[in-house]
Image (cartoon, grey):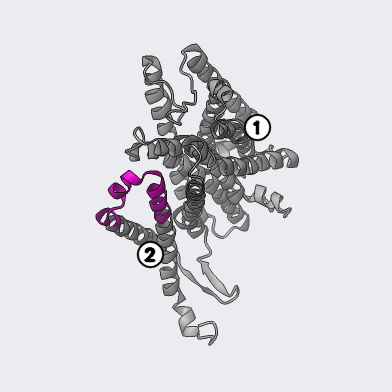
C-alpha cells in the first residue's frame, strides 16, 4: 500500500487498522497473563495447576479474546472511531475527535500502558526470585518495592516541584493536584527510605517501630484518596455547572476543603491508631501490615470504616468520572464550531484522563481484595496485593498526572502551554 501508493488500499486501511488495534489489545492482555503465569510458577508452585491447568488456561484465553473483541468493536463500531492510514503523517492514526481520544485512552492505550507497567514489575520480581533463591523470602520480595518507590518519588516529587516552581496553583484543579501529588510523594518516600530497607535488611529496630511509619502512611493515604474524590467532583462541577464553578471551587474554598480533609484524616487516624490501639505494624511472619482484627473495635473499623468506606469512595469516583466524560462529549457537539470552546473541551478531556486513570487504579486495588482467593493463605499473594499494591497505586498516580496533564507535561519538556480564552464555558484556569 505504501510502497506502491495504492489509493484503493489506503481507502480501506481502516479494516487493517481494526485488526491491528484488536491484536494490540489482545497481545497486551496475553503478555500480562504470561507474566502472571511465570510469577505463580515461581512463587506459588503448589497452586500453579489450580490456576493454569489446560482447562482454565483455554477458558482464560477465550475470555480475553472475547473481551478484546468487545472493547474494539465498541470503540470502532459503537463510537465510530477508525484507525486508518494518514497520507500527511505517513502513519496510522485514530479519528481526530475528542470522543475517540478519550475512549481510546480509557479503553485501549491507557489500559495498555497500565498493563505494561504491571508486566514489567512482574518480570523484574520474578527474575530477582530466580537469581536470588538463597536469600530469605521476606528480604527478597521486599526488593520489588525499590523500583516502584524510586519511580514513584520521581513522578510525584517532579509534579509537586513543577507546580510550585511555575506558580500554577492559581487554578483550583492544580491546587488539588499539587496537594495530592505531595501526599503521594511523601507516601512513596516513606516506602523507599523506611519500609523497603526494613524488609530487605530485616532490621529489628525498624520493624519494632514500624507502627509509626504505618501511621504516617495511612494519614497520607487517607488524605490522598479523599482529595481524589474532591478532584473528580471538581471536574463534575466544572462541566455540569460551569457558571457556579468559581463560587464552589475558588482558591479560598478549595483551600478550606483541603484543610478540612487533612485535619479530619489526621485526627481520625490519630484516634484510631494511638487512641484505640489499632496499629499498622509490619509483621515479619505474615509479610503484611494490617489492622489487628482480633480487637473488636479494630476489626469493625478495618472492615466498615476503612475498606468499605474507601471502596464506596473509589466507586463513586469512577461513576462521577464516567458521567463527566459523557457530558464532555455532549459539550463538544454543542460547541463544535467554536475554536476557543474546542480548546476548552480538549483541556477538560486531558484533566478527565488524569482523574479517570487514577480512579481506575484505586478501583482495581480495592477490587483485588475481593477477587484474590489466596489473600489470607498465601504470603506472596498477600504481600503483593497489599504492600506492593499500595505503593504501586501512588506511583501510577504520579505517572498518570505527567502523562495526561498537558500543562505539567509541557513544563517538563519546556514547551509552551496554550490556554483557552474567551470560551462561553468557564475555564478551569480561572
In the picture, measured across the screen, residue 287 lies left or right of residue 428, that is: left
Q: Residue pushed farthest left?
A: 55
Residue receiving disc 1: 251
Q: Nearer the viewer, residue 66 or 89?
A: 66
Across and down, in percent, residue 78 comes to 38, 61
When the figure is inspected, residue 286 is found, relative to residue 271, above or below; the finding is: below
Let me know if residue 34 is in the magenta part. yes
Instruction: Classify residue 25 by image quadrant.
Output: bottom left
Quadrant in which the C terminus appears: top right
When the figure is inspected, residue 189 is found, relative to residue 123, above or below; the finding is: above
Give the secondary structure at mark 1.
Answer: helix
Give the secondary structure at mark 2.
Answer: helix
Q: Which mark is residue 204?
A: none
Q: Is residue 325 visible?
A: yes
Q: Which residues are magenta?
A: 33-57
Across and down, in percent, residue 262 comes to 58, 24
> Which residue shows up at 40% across the image and 23% down it?
302
Across and down, in percent, residue 126 comes to 47, 49
Whichever of labels 2 and 1 marks the residue nearer the N terminus, that label is 2
Let me know if residue 148 is in the magenta part. no
Residue receiving disc 2: 77
Amino acid at each position: 500500500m505504501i510502497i506502491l501508493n495504492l489509493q484503493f488500499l489506503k481507502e480501506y486501511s481502516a479494516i487493517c487498522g481494526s485488526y491491528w488495534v484488536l491484536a494490540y489489545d489482545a497481545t497486551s492482555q496475553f503478555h500480562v497473563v504470561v507474566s502472571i503465569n511465570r510469577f505463580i510458577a515461581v512463587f506459588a508452585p503448589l497452586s500453579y495447576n489450580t490456576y493454569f491447568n489446560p482447562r482454565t488456561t483455554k477458558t482464560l484465553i477465550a475470555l480475553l479474546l472475547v473481551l478484546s473483541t468487545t472493547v474494539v468493536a465498541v470503540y470502532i463500531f459503537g463510537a465510530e472511531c477508525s484507525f486508518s492510514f494518514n497520507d500527511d503523517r505517513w502513519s496510522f492514526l485514530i479519528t481526530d475527535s475528542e470522543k475517540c481520544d478519550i475512549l481510546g485512552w480509557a479503553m485501549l492505550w491507557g489500559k495498555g500502558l497500565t498493563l505494561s507497567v504491571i508486566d514489567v514489575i512482574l518480570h523484574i520480581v520474578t527474575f530477582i526470585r530466580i537469581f536470588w533463591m538463597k536469600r530469605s523470602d521476606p528480604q527478597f520480595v521486599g526488593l520489588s518495592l525499590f523500583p516502584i518507590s524510586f519511580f514513584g518519588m520521581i513522578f510525584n516529587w517532579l509534579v509537586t516541584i513543577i507546580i510550585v516552581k511555575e506558580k500554577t496553583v492559581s487554578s483550583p484543579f492544580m491546587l488539588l493536584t499539587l496537594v495530592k501529588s505531595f501526599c503521594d510523594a511523601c507516601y512513596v518516600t516513606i516506602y523507599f527510605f523506611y519500609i523497603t530497607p526494613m524488609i530487605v535488611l530485616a532490621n529489628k529496630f525498624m520493624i519494632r517501630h514500624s507502627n509509626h511509619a504505618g501511621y504516617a502512611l495511612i494519614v497520607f493515604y487517607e488524605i490522598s484518596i479523599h482529595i481524589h474524590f474532591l478532584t473528580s467532583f471538581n471536574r463534575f462541577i466544572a462541566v455540569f455547572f460551569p457558571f457556579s464553578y468559581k463560587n464552589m471551587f475558588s482558591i479560598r474554598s478549595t483551600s478550606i476543603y483541603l484543610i478540612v480533609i487533612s485535619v479530619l484524616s489526621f485526627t481520625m487516624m490519630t484516634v484510631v491508631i494511638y487512641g484505640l490501639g489499632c496499629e499498622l505494624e509490619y509483621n515479619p511472619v505474615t509479610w503484611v501490615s494490617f489492622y489487628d482484627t482480633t480487637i473488636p473495635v479494630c476489626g469493625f473499623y478495618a472492615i466498615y470504616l476503612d475498606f468499605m468506606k474507601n471502596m464506596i469512595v473509589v466507586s463513586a469516583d469512577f461513576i462521577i468520572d464516567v458521567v463527566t466524560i459523557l457530558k464532555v462529549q455532549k459539550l463538544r457537539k454543542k460547541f463544535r464550531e467554536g475554536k476557543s470552546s474546542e480548546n476548552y473541551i480538549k483541556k477538560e478531556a486531558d484533566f478527565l484522563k488524569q482523574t479517570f486513570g487514577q480512579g481506575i487504579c484505586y478501583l482495581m486495588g480495592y477490587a483485588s481484595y475481593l477477587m484474590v482467593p489466596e489473600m489470607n493463605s498465601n504470603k506472596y499473594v498477600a504481600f503483593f496485593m497489599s504492600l506492593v499494591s499500595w505503593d504501586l497505586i501512588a506511583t501510577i498516580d504520579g505517572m498518570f498526572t505527567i502523562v495526561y496533564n498537558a500543562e505539567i507535561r509541557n513544563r517538563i519538556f519546556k514547551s509552551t502551554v496554550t490556554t483557552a480564552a474567551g470560551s462561553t464555558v468557564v475555564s478551569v484556569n480561572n
